[in-house]
Image (cartoon, grey):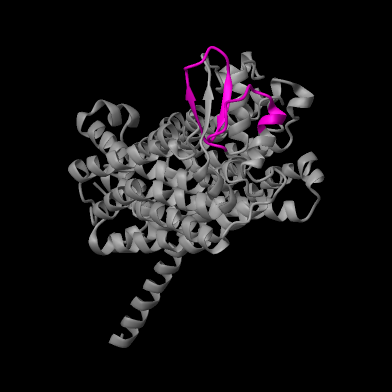
Amino acid sequence: MSIQAITSGTTSASHHLDRDKKRIVFAAALGTVFEWYDFFIYGSLAAFFSTLFFPKGNETAALLAALATFGAGFVLRPFGAVVFGRLGDLVGRKKTFLVTMLVMGLATAAVGLLPTFETLGWWAPAILVGLRLLQGLAVGGEFGGAVTYVAEHSDSDKRGFTTSWIQITATLGLFLSLAVILLCRYSMSVESFASWGWRIPFVGSIGLLVLSLYIRLKLHESPVFQQMKAEGKGSKNPIGDTFGDPRNLRLVLVAIFGVVAGQAVIWYTGHFYSLYFMTTTLKMSHEQANTYLLAGLALGTPFFLFFGWLSDKIGRKWIVVTGCALSAVLIMPLFQGLATYGNPALAEFRARTLVVIHANDCSEDQSLFGQLFSPLATKECTRVKALLTSRAVPYAVKADSASLSVQIGDQPAMAFDEAKLLKTLNESGLPSAKAPAEPNAPMVIAVLFALVFLATMVYGPLGALLVELFPVHIRYSGVSVALQLGNGWIGGFAPFVATAVVIATGNILGGLWYTVVIAGLTAIIGALFLPETRGRDLST
């Protein structure tokens, strides 16, 4: 046989191998995109859901309840990581994420069929929370499995870039959810969307479920997992080995607090809290906010791949640490810019007007649990705070008066009267509730792009870093637990915590300190304790 024939055969085999790897990455990534779409479709409509599944009469409490329900989807993510991580290390990567996909798809479709509060009363939000918990359980085992599966099929010198296609799926899932919602909103009247149109994105996900299952059924098991089983190196108790072995437990803690916690708050603040901030605080229409965020995502998303590729060249650790440090410094000024450019008239009013609530008792439970017992605001001070928050008017509270009064700027304090208070605020320059926001669109998109860009720095290399951090016999469990504890219990509640702080303090930027502090601490812990993992052998 000639050298040319041998070379030709080798090249052909190489091309065939490359095609197989591309097909594996495409199939795993596409399935994960659809699963993230299912999980995030509620988050994209959370502010809207506050009017459907919670009682009327206290807008701020209903919004907090809707955001808490969004957060409920994160509560069971670590438990999903434990359950499905164990299955993934015992029976295989492929079979496990087929199960997670089925659970996710069915729970999502059920949300689209759920009667509202007007029909079922408190059973409606109770069932909604239950479905969100099922979604959280499913996604807890999905993402770690997908990124582990792809990494174990990748070349060591391209692992960061290859797994970044899985990292990109969360943003693509959000992008897809926003696009479907916008399509529904633009294709029907406001009344139709509020009545039944919102159900279409949920029920329609059944089609995505069928397609995803079909694609993933064609995949083969990870060769690294097969080798581990053939050599008898698998763990009989992956969860026990993950938490019971001090070395493995240390890896989990370093992964959570040295990288995942920062990634989680940065991602959810930039992708979700920015959306709520635009609609509830800056008073943009849902169409405006969704369109601007779609543009920011379209511009920023390719950088997930860029930073994954870059991590193959210079290492993963310092890209992630730098992204966390930059986010801790820049998140606050970026949101200040978003407030300025998102509604210039409202920003001008806030800059020159100070509102002070003088009261003796201004405490009332506005949480989800408080709403179960007292869904309506009963104290005058709570009603004042709810009114000001609903109009995005910052305020300060001073416990210096036996009777409640409100002072606007240099004007004399007045007793609370809703109509009179709104009239005085409007006369002081507060834009009318009916006046549409007039954003500086290019600058809003630029700010949103910057927020997404920061998330790509931390998230792009994350998949490869985590897979390389854990030994093969507990890899699915270790990656999933670290991801879901950080994202589920630290990052997923970032929008809820930020909104709750704003309502409690009257400072529209006050809730961002949660993100700033966690991102900063993650940068410090990561710099001190996170090892560089680039190029590690995944068979050990």
Q: Position of residue 137 (x, y in %)?
A: 51, 32
Which quadrant is the N terminus positioned in? Answer: bottom left
Judge whether residue 213 is colored magenta: no
Quick check: 353 left or right of 477?
A: right
Pick the front one: 117 or 463: 117
> In the rendered view, would you say 354 is above or below 10?
above
The answer to whether residue 524 is above or below residue 459 is above
In this rendered view, identify the residue nearer to me: 328 or 507: 507
Query: Residue 506's x, y, as percent?
Result: 50, 32
Q: Position of residue 138 (x, y in %)?
A: 52, 36
Q: Quadrant of residue 365?
A: top right
Q: Which residues are magenta?
A: 393-421
Q: Is residue 402 magenta?
A: yes
Residue 16 in the image: above or below residue 240 = below
Q: Residue at x 68, y 26 (%)?
A: 54
x, y percent for residue 206? 68, 45
Foreground residue, 404 or 73? Answer: 404
